[in-house]
Structures are given as structure tokens and as C-alpha cells.
Image: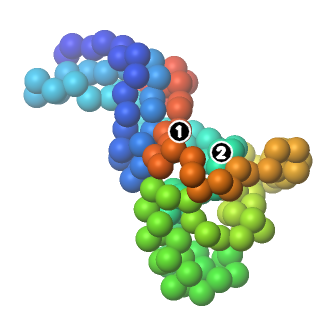
Amino acid sequence: MDKTIQNEFIDYGCGFPVLLKNVPMRKVHGKWIPDVNYNELEKSILIMLCHKPFKLTGNEIRFIRLYFEMTLKEFANRFGVQHPTVVKWENFKNDPTNMTLGTEKDIRLFLIGHIKGKRKIADLYTEFEQKPFRTNRSVEPLQTIEIDMEGVAI
């Protein structure tokens, strides 16, 4: 089986672009595909979303909800909104949602608590206070999350 390292690869498997760096690739049926542990990649993406300096997009909210295998209603109940609100957020697709800053923080704290453990929540909350989200909607329409794949390779 042929293998190589690709400097950059944009993966759309989560519903939004993720720029992967130093990606191990393997050739399967004549096509190059990433040779990565997708469970670890998803966890890395969730951590990156916690620290993203911009508001979450609709597709990122959908990815979070589906990662935790939550229905619209379960996700809405967890974050104190009605399920049509979650549908509205997800319909923003690649644009930042209009959710309140408090809800956005709650979602990010929920992520870090489940992925990194409860002790990391205080660190993330301090980070939020030091550099608030940029809410300018005139930012690039489609931002990518960048992950170095060295620690995620199979």
C-alpha cells in the first residue's frame, strides 16, 4: 500500500472545512485518502471550536449536536432554548449564528468539560474574559479550522 504525507488537506467530513496539516495519506483503489483516526480528529476539532475566536457557525453547531448524539430537542433543552431555535442556528450553515454570548459560552464550556474534563472549564472561561469573540459578520464567509495531524495519525 502506497503512503505519503500531504502538507495540507481540506476535509469537509464534519460539515465545514477543516484544514489538516502534515496529513498521512494512503492510496486506496487509486485514490489518496487521509490515513487518520477520525475519532481523535473529531475530538481535536471540538477542542479547536472551544478556542475559536469567532462565533460558531450553524454547521459547527450541527456537528457538535450530532457528535454528542443529541436530538434537536435534547440539545435545545440542554442549552435552555426551544428546538426551533436550534434549527434556526443550524440553518445559518457556514455563517455565524445569532445566539447570545451566554449560550455560546455555555456550549463551549459543555464541550471542554466533556472532552478535557471539568478542571479545564475555568481556564477556558478565563480565556473568554481575556479576548472576547469577534462578532463582526463581515469576516471571511468561510473560515477553516487548522489542525496539525501529527498526533492524530493512525
Q: Residue 4 in the image: x percent, y percent?
A: 31, 12
Verify CB contact (< 8 Å) between mark 2 and mark 1. yes
Q: Looking at the image, which residue is at 27% across and 14% down?
A: 3
Disc 2 target residue: 52
Q: Quadrant of residue 154?
A: top left
Q: Residue 18 in the image: x percent, y percent?
A: 45, 39
Q: CA distance from mark 2 to mark 1?
A: 8 Å
Quick one: SS at disc 2? Answer: loop
Quick one: SS at disc 1? Answer: strand
Quarter of the image that includes the N terminus? top left
Q: Which mark is residue 12?
A: none
Of marks 2 and 1, which one's residue comes earlier in the chain? 2
- Up the image or down, 75 lies above or below 97; here it is below
Q: Mark 2 packing: few (<14 Cα in 10 Å), some, or many (20+)?
A: some
- Up the image or down, 84 lies above or below 49; here it is below
Q: Quadrant of residue 47?
A: top right
Viewer-proximal residue among 46 and 133: 133
- Mark 1 is on which residue type? Ile
Disc 1 target residue: 145
Taking the image as shown, residue 103 lies to the left or right of residue 41, namely: right
Q: Looking at the image, which residue is at 57% across and 65% down?
A: 97
Taking the image as shown, residue 82 lies to the left or right of residue 9, namely: right
- Mark 2 is on which residue type? Lys
Q: Looking at the image, which residue is at 45% across and 32% down?
A: 19
Taking the image as shown, residue 46 lies to the left or right of residue 149, namely: right
Q: Looking at the image, which residue is at 51% across and 85% down?
A: 84
Q: Residue 129 in the image: x percent, y percent?
A: 88, 50
Taking the image as shown, residue 1 lies to the left or right of residue 99, namely: left
- Up the image or down, 69 lies above or below 14; here it is below
